[in-house]
Amino acid sequence: MIKILRYAEYIYAIVAIFSFYRIFTDWNTDRESAYLFVFFAIVSVGMFLFRRAYRKKFEQRQKDNENQ
């Protein structure tokens, strides 16, 4: 279960990197498309951080339950 959560984090990170790439390549040519990718980048970074915090909390809870 933990490995699946970790992979989901990295999928969001990959989407964010791709979005930043598209922002930089499309900014001067297609501004509307670039704004869409700005939105995707912000959401992807937020989801990456949220998933990471959630996974660490889940791991800590499992560790605490094993020690009891």
Image (cartoon, rainbow, N blue to C red):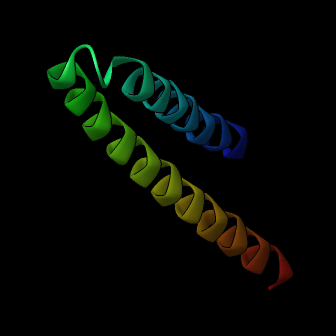
Describe residue 12's horizontal placement relative to residue 39 as left or right: right
Q: Position of residue 26 (x, y in %)?
A: 34, 18
The residue lying furthest to the bottom in this view is 68
Q: Relative to residue 4, is residue 39 drawn left or right?
A: left
Does 54 sit left or right of 32 as displayed? right
Task: Give the residue displayed 67% in from the left and 43% down from the top.
Answer: 6
Q: Residue at x 73, y 76 (%)?
A: 65
Q: Quadrant of the C terminus?
A: bottom right
Given residues 31 and 50, the one toward you in this image is 31
State which quadrant residue 17 falls in: top right
Is residue 45 placed above or below 10 in the rendered structure? below
- Of 35 and 3, the residue lying toward us: 35
Q: Residue furthest right?
A: 67
Quadrant of the drawing holding the N terminus: top right
Image location (x, y in percent) of residue 41: 38, 39
In the image, residue 63 sits, relative to residue 35, either above or below, namely below
- Asked whether 65 or 24 is in front, the reply is 24
Residue 27, image x and y in percent? 31, 25
For this orientation, the residue located farthest to the top is 29
For image coordinates 56% across by 65% down, the residue present is: 53
Judge whether 53 appears above or below 30 on screen: below
The single residue placed furthest to the left in the displayed view is: 32
Q: Residue at x 65, y 34 (%)?
A: 7
Q: Quadrant of residue 62?
A: bottom right
Total labels drawn: 0
Residue 64 sits in which quadrant?
Answer: bottom right
